[in-house]
Image (cartoon, rainbow, N blue to C red):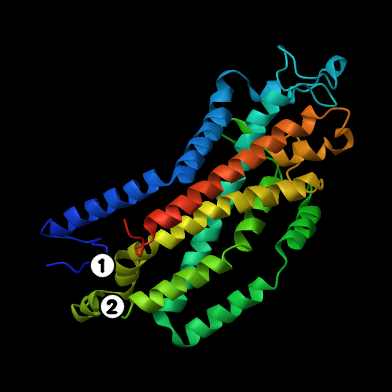
């Protein structure tokens, strides 16, 4: 006979597996009824298809190709999004730049989630001096201004981190720096959420039963408590992707983010600020893609929050 949590994560007889399946159906039904969440999901899927599907029509060489005879050309059949100050095709650059922006957002959130869940789980489960130490460290991290640190570290490491070759693409070393800084300065809210859930769940009967039968602490954390905290973790991670994309856009707009030859939506805006009126296509298209992506992620996160809320009444 196994020990199962309140959401029926572990099961031997098959009854709890049916309950889990029913819970998934309930979540999907709630999410499907949330019109803004469905719109956000569709919008996000379209953005992903745009950045990935565009590679079937353009290569990275096309995105970085300079043709000074075609500088600052407005949108046309040859260049639907126009060209930039050195004659590069903006459509191709938004495709490959979008891949980097999305990759930075997802990678930073992975770092944030791993650190936040680890700190929150250890603090909430063990309590005592471990909880006090980790929470004081978390509170100290709240005082670190993320944007200021991003600017300083991006400036400090500029040109010092070698370029990376991954999946046939060349990435400037600044990508790694930005992912690390965003991820390591964004985990505190998630850690406090996870800690609160662990403090509550570790006093439940099924956790006491797991201790009685001799289940190791690591197994209790990973198999019984952590699965029952996935709802707030998923919601927090989803909303953090949008925040990470915006953070990258901020510092890239200031010229201290991802450096050439790697394009992002943010550093495309940096090269457009002198042409706001004379060449609006240089900022309209990458700016619009950032807005649509962030809106889609936020709508999706709101829908997941409502769908996974156990207090929601159908």
Name the residue at 45% across, 69% down: 194
The mark nearer the N terminus, 1 or 2, is 1
> Residue 50 sits in which quadrant?
top right
Badge 1 element: loop
Q: Position of residue 228 (x, y in %)?
A: 34, 65
Residue 262 visible within the image: no
Disc 1 versus disc 2: distance between alpha carbons? 9 Å
CB under 8 Å between discs 1 and 2: yes
Q: Tell me: residue 118, above or below residue 106.
A: below
Q: Residue furthest front?
A: 314
Q: In screen coordinates, is 197 left or right of 161?
A: left
Residue 270 shows in this picture: yes
Name which residue lies at 33% across and 69% down.
Answer: 225
Above or below, comparing residue 266 to residue 308 in the picture:
above
Mark 1, Cα crowd under 10 Å, few <14 / some 14-19 / many 20+, is some
Q: Is residue 109 above or below residue 188?
A: above
Residue that appears at 47% across and 45% down: 37
Which quadrant would residue 83 be assigned to in this image? top right
Residue 146 drawn at (x, y percent): 70, 62
Given residues 308 and 145, the one toward you in this image is 308
Q: Residue placed at 74% from the left, 59% from the top? A: 147
Could you tell me which secondary element the residue under label 2 belongs to?
loop
Please give the residue where the numbered disc 2 appears in the rendered image. 204
Q: How many marks?
A: 2
| Residue 285: quarter of image | top right
Q: Which residue is mark 1?
A: 6
* Residue 65 placement (x, y as % from top left): 75, 21
The label on residue 283 is none
């Amino acid at each position: 006979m196994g020990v199962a949590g309140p959401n029926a994560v572990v099961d031997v007889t098959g009854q709890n597996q049916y309950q889990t399946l029913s819970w998934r159906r309930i979540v999907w039904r709630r999410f499907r009824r949330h019109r803004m969440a469905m719109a956000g999901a569709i919008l996000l899927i379209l953005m992903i298809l745009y950045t990935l599907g565009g590679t079937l029509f353009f290569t990275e060489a096309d995105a970085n190709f300079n043709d000074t005879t075609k500088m600052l050309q407005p949108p046309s059949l040859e260049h639907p999004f126009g060209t930039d100050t050195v004659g590069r095709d903006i459509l191709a650059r938004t495709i490959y730049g979008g891949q980097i922006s999305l990759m930075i957002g997802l990678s930073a959130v992975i770092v944030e989630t791993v650190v936040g869940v680890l700190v929150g789980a250890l603090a909430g489960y063990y309590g005592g001096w471990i909880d006090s130490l980790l929470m004081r460290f978390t509170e100290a991290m709240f005082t670190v201004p993320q944007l200021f640190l991003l600017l300083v570290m991006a400036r400090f490491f500029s040109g010092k981190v070698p370029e990376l070759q991954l999946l046939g693409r060349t990435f400037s070393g600044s990508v790694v720096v930005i992912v690390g800084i965003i991820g390591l300065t964004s985990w505190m809210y998630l850690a406090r959420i996870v800690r609160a859930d662990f403090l509550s769940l570790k006093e439940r009967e099924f956790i006491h039963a797991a201790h009685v039968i001799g289940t190791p602490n690591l197994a209790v954390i990973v198999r019984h408590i952590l699965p029952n905290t996935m709802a707030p973790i998923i919601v927090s991670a989803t909303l953090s992707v949008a925040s990470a994309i915006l953070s990258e856009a901020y510092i890239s707009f200031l010229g201290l983010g991802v450096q050439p030859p790697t394009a992002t939506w943010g550093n495309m805006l940096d090269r457009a600020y002198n042409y706001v009126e004379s060449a609006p296509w240089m900022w309209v298209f990458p700016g619009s893609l950032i807005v649509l992506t962030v809106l889609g992620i936020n709508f999706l996160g709101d829908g997941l929050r409502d769908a996974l809320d156990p207090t929601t009444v159908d």
